[in-house]
Amino acid sequence: MEENKITKFLKGTASPQEEHEVREWLMQPGSRKEFDELIESYWKKAAPSTIDEVDYDGMLRDIHKRMQLPSQVSNSGRRVFIYKSLRVAASLLLFVFCSYVLVESYRDRNARTSDQTQVQRIITTKTTGPGEKLTLVMSDKTRIIVNSESEISFFSDYGINDRLIKIKGEAFFDVAPDPSRPFKVITDKVTTTALGTEFNVYSRNHDYRIALVEGKVAVDKIGNQIELTPGLMALWNSKGITRDDFAVQSFDIEKITGWKEGNLIFERKRFGDVLDDLAGWYSVDIQVEEGIDVNKKVIGTFQNKNLQDILTGLSFSLDFSFTIDNNRVHIKK
C-alpha cells in the first residue's frame, strides 16, 4: 500500500476511493505490521499541534524508566518480562495515538461535511405577482409552471439527496423520472409524491386540489393517503365538508390545466368569482357598481385574450358596460 494513501487516510483527506482501498488493504494478512510501522513513523514526525501538544515520546521514556530494573539484575525471565511489557506499553501508546488521529480526522471531516451541508441547504423562494407566470426547469429536468400570485420554494441542493418542493397557490409539474429520489410537493398539510408524472396542484384559501394528468401519484394528509390514476383529482377543503377526508372525482384536463397555456375556461362559475380571477390574472383593481348581479353563472372559453377582449365578450351576455383606466376597471350597468 502506498504510504501517501495511508497518511491521507489518517489525516482524513483521502478520497472515498482511496479510503476504500486502505480499508480493504487493512483486512489483508501482513498489513498490520506495515501499518504499525507507518503509524510509529508518523507519530514521531507529527507536529505538536497535530497530537494536541502531548509528548508521547516523553511518556514512552517515562514508562521505560519506571519499568527499568537495576543494571545488576540478570534474571533472564525478568528481562523477557520487561521486554514484553515495553512492547505492550509501546503498542498501547501507538493504539492511543492512532485512535486519536482517526477520531480527530473523522471529527474534522464531519465538521467539514456539516459546514458544507449548511451552506448547501439554502432555501430558494420565487413568487409571482398578479398576471405573472413563471416557468422553472430544475436540475433533474423537471419542468414547473407557476401560476400568478403563487409562491414556490426549494432547497439549493435539490436533486442531490431529495426532490422536495413547497407551493402556495397553483403550479403544474412535469416530473422527470428518478425512482431513487421520489418527487414531493408540499402544500400546507398535504404531500403529493410522484416518480415521473404530470399533475396540477392548487392551494388557495384552504382549498386544495391535486389533479393527475399522467403517471401515478400518492396524496397524503397526515396519514390519510390515497393514490390517483390519470383523470382523477383529489379535493380537500380544511373548512368544508371534506375537512377530514379527501374527495376524489374526475376532471376535465383542459379546464384544470388550461391556465398554463393562457386559456381561461369558465364552467358555470359565478360572475363575481370570474371578476376576482381576472383581477388576479391581469393585475387590476375591479370595482363593481351596485345593481350588477354577481351571482349569474358564466360559461365561456377565452384563448390568449387580453382583458378588454374578455370583458367585451362577457358584457354581451351579462348586459354590462365597463371602462379600463390603467390598472383600474369599473363595471357598471
Image (cartoon, rainbow, N blue to C red):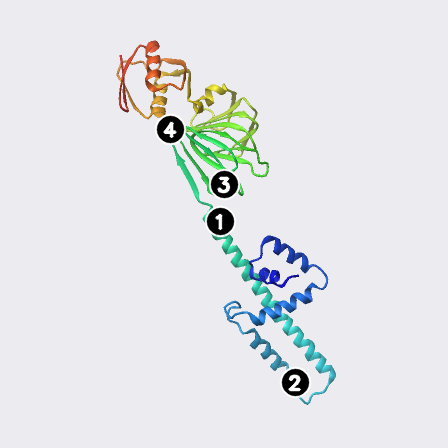
Query: Which residue in the structure is indicated by mark 4?
Result: 132
- Asked if the residue at tag 3 contacts the one at tag 2, i.e. Cβ–Cβ closer than 8 Å, the answer is no
Query: Which residue in the structure is indicated by mark 3?
Result: 158
- Residues packed near mark 1 inside 10 Å, few (<14), some (14 to 19) or many (20 plus): few
**Closer to the N terminus: mark 2 or mark 3?**
2
**Which image quadrant is residue 322 in?**
top left
Q: Nearer the viewer, mark 2 or mark 4?
A: 4
Label 4 is placed on what type of residue? Glu
Looking at the rendered structure, the secondary structure element under dot 1 is helix
Q: CA distance from mark 3 to mark 4?
A: 24 Å
Residue 117 is labelled as 1
- Asked if the residue at tag 4 contacts the one at tag 3, i.e. Cβ–Cβ closer than 8 Å, the answer is no
Name the spot of residue 56 as percent of width and height, x first.
Answer: 56, 73
Looking at the rendered structure, the secondary structure element under dot 3 is loop
Label 1 is placed on what type of residue? Thr
Query: Which residue in the structure is indicated by mark 2?
Result: 69
Name the spot of residue 13 as percent of width and height, x first.
Answer: 55, 58
Q: Nearer the viewer, mark 1 or mark 4?
A: 4
Asked whether, in this view, residue 196 is left or right of residue 303, the answer is right
Q: CA distance from mark 1 to mark 3?
A: 12 Å
Label 2 is placed on what type of residue? Leu
Looking at the rendered structure, the secondary structure element under dot 4 is loop
**Closer to the N terminus: mark 1 or mark 3?**
1
Which residue lies at the image location 49% right of the left edge and 52% below the top edge?
Answer: 114
Name the spot of residue 249 as percent of width and height, x first.
Answer: 52, 21
**Closer to the N terminus: mark 3 or mark 4?**
4
